[in-house]
Amino acid sequence: MNLSHLHPRQFWSDETGLTVLLIFSLGYFIVLNSLGGFWGGRLVAQIFFSLIIVAGVLTTFKQKWLSALVIVLAVASLALNWAKEIRPIEGLAVLTTGLSLIYLGILLAVVIAQVFRDGPVTAYRIHGAILIYLLLGAIWALSYQVVALTIPQAFRWPENLLAGDSDVLRQELMYFSFITLTTTGYGDITAVYPVARTLVMLEALVGQLYPAIILARLVSLAIIHRKGTS
């Protein structure tokens, strides 16, 4: 066994980490949406989100300046997310969500760079392409949450929903984000404020364009690599 592959720096630079990030992300989304209404479910979801943050830090090992920035954001995001779970404070939810949004935006850029760089199209890159789609949905969900926390009338909610609860908001808006990204649109949650509507339109456009763009790019990379090795 080549021990160099056990080093985290080598592990993530070889694209293997994209699969692990995808697993953590799927775990977070599944637990948040199915068990987010229970304290234990929120705790497990928070653990998965923490793993995503730690894994994201590892992906930036090769870029020292970026690694330093991501580490600062990761530590702040982890601290605020766990502080919110342990002792909720009014006004902390907006700051926590904003930092998580910035962090996931940087992570998205890093994963895009890994997936679409030159080279053979491996299974890890396919996993990374799926991860990008999930990250897009999560980023829009956090954007919706920032809007909902600052403008309570931005969305029309189902009856009996505690829209002021940040944990409930994150669960509901994660669901809303993905049905918007896939242009399913059940209509149980609707955007009624201009900023929220604009975000919804942009997400629907990205949800339609992304599969076509990524398929074209991955196919072109595969063709280029095949010609280069023939």
Image (spheres, rainbow, N blue to C red):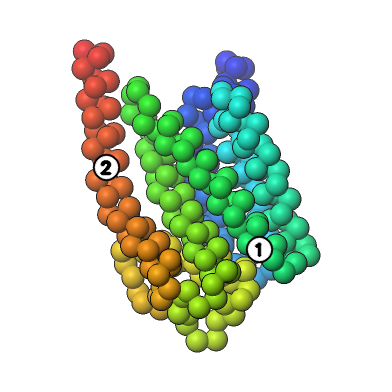
Q: Which corner quadrant holds the C terminus?
A: top left
Instruction: Determine the residue positioned at 40% across, 61% down.
Output: 199
**Where does the image place residue 37, in percent across and percent down from the top left?**
61, 72
**Is the N terminus in the top left, top right, bottom left or bottom right quadrant?**
top right
Q: Residue at x 70, y 62 (%)?
A: 92
Secondary structure under tag 1 reads helix
Dividing the picture into quarters, in which one does residue 74 lie?
Answer: top right
Say which element carries label 2: helix
Q: Position of residue 125 (x, y in %)?
A: 39, 34
Residue drawn at x 30%, y 56% is 205
Q: Which residue lies most toward the right here? A: 87
In percent of width and height, residue 202 lies at 35, 58
The CA span between labels 2 and 1 is: 35 Å
Residue 64 in which image quadrant: top right
- Answer above or below: position of 33 versus 3: below
Q: Residues within 10 Å of mark 1 (few under 14, many from 20)?
A: many
Q: Which residue is mark 1?
A: 93
Question: Which residue, given by chain and number where applicable, does mark 2 sit on?
Answer: 213
The type of residue carrying mark 1 is Ala
Mark 2: amino acid: Ile
* Residue situated furthest bottom in the rendering: 159
Q: Is residue 157 above or below residue 90?
A: below
Residue 13: image location, x then y, percent: 52, 25
Q: Which mark is residue 130?
A: none
Determine whether, in the image, residue 189 is placed left or right of residue 145. left
**Of the pair 127 and 92, the residue shown nearer to us:** 92
Toward the front, the furthest residue is 194
Characterize the local packing of mark 2: few (<14), some (14-19) or many (20 or more) Cα atoms within 10 angstroms. few
Q: Nearer the viewer, mark 2 or mark 1?
A: 1
